[in-house]
Image (cartoon, rainbow, N blue to C red):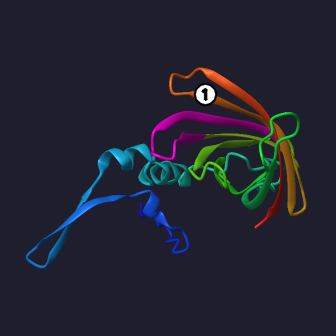
Amino acid sequence: MTLFFPSFPEIDFRNRLEVAGSIQFGGAMAQAINRRKLLAKGGVLAPAAGLAALIGADAVNADPATGTVHRIAGTWHVDISFPGPAGNPPEKGLFLFTESGAVICTNTRIRDLGLGKWRSINSSRFSFTFRHHMYMPDGTWMGTLDIAHTGTVTGNTFTSSGTGSVYDTGGTLSESVSSQVTAVRY
């Protein structure tokens, strides 16, 4: 099976791959990649490999009565807010819900891929979970952020609400924050 991964020229991958140095050898450029920083940033191959595994999966969220895929499947521009005393500023992001039940997302604060899954509750209701890895500006891994939401699709919009749970590198829960998402199909 041949997989096709489209190129995204608008995405700047330079933060993901830092070149530690380069040496000229007979006209050929050799570059030494700082492996530690590459691994600390999470790389780009692990999410791609996970996505490749999901591409071949059956449409687990199809409605058995009609054979149609749930209306959440597709790409969404999202606005994320944090009601209550959390004090977190609002965020923007892009979420992709695949027909096979995968969730891939980004947002303006974490800037690392979130990967997870979603399931159909009924023809308009759904739930989803995903995980972000969190890093300090110097690339040090801080832990994970797990999101669990339930939502409703209406036409080309959806709303959802739920909780984000922050875990440190030892897996200890350090914070839980409520969040709400409003989205428009992209």
Where, by quadrant of the figure, is residue 87 drawn?
Answer: top right
Q: Position of residue 124 (x, y in %)?
A: 88, 49
Residue visible at 65% across and 24% down in the picture: 174
Quadrant containing the N terminus is bottom left
Residue 132 against residue 171 in the figure, above or below: below
Residue visible at 43% across and 51% down in the picture: 43
Residue 62 against residue 84 in the figure, above or below: below
Which structural element holds mark 1? strand
Quadrant containing the C terminus is bottom right
Q: Residues within 10 Å of mark 1 (few under 14, many from 20)?
A: some
Q: Is residue 42 visible?
A: yes
Q: Position of residue 88 (x, y in %)?
A: 77, 42
Residue sitting nearer the eye, 25 or 104:
25
Residue 110 against residue 150 in the figure, above or below: below
Q: Position of residue 35 (x, y in %)?
A: 30, 48
Residue sitting nearer the eye, 44 or 69:
44
Q: Position of residue 106 (x, y in %)?
A: 64, 54
Does residue 53 appear to the left or right of 155 in the view shown? Answer: left
Residue furthest to the right in view is: 154
- Please give the residue where the numbered disc 1 appears in the rendered image: 167
The secondary structure making up most of the magenta span is: strand
Residue sitting nearer the eye, 184 or 137:
137
Amino acid at dot 1: Tyr
The stretch in magenta equals: 132-150
Residue sitting nearer the eye, 45 or 138:
138
Q: Is residue 98 visible?
A: no
Does residue 174 appear to the left or right of 17 in the view shown? Answer: right
Within the magenta stretch, is there residue 135?
Answer: yes
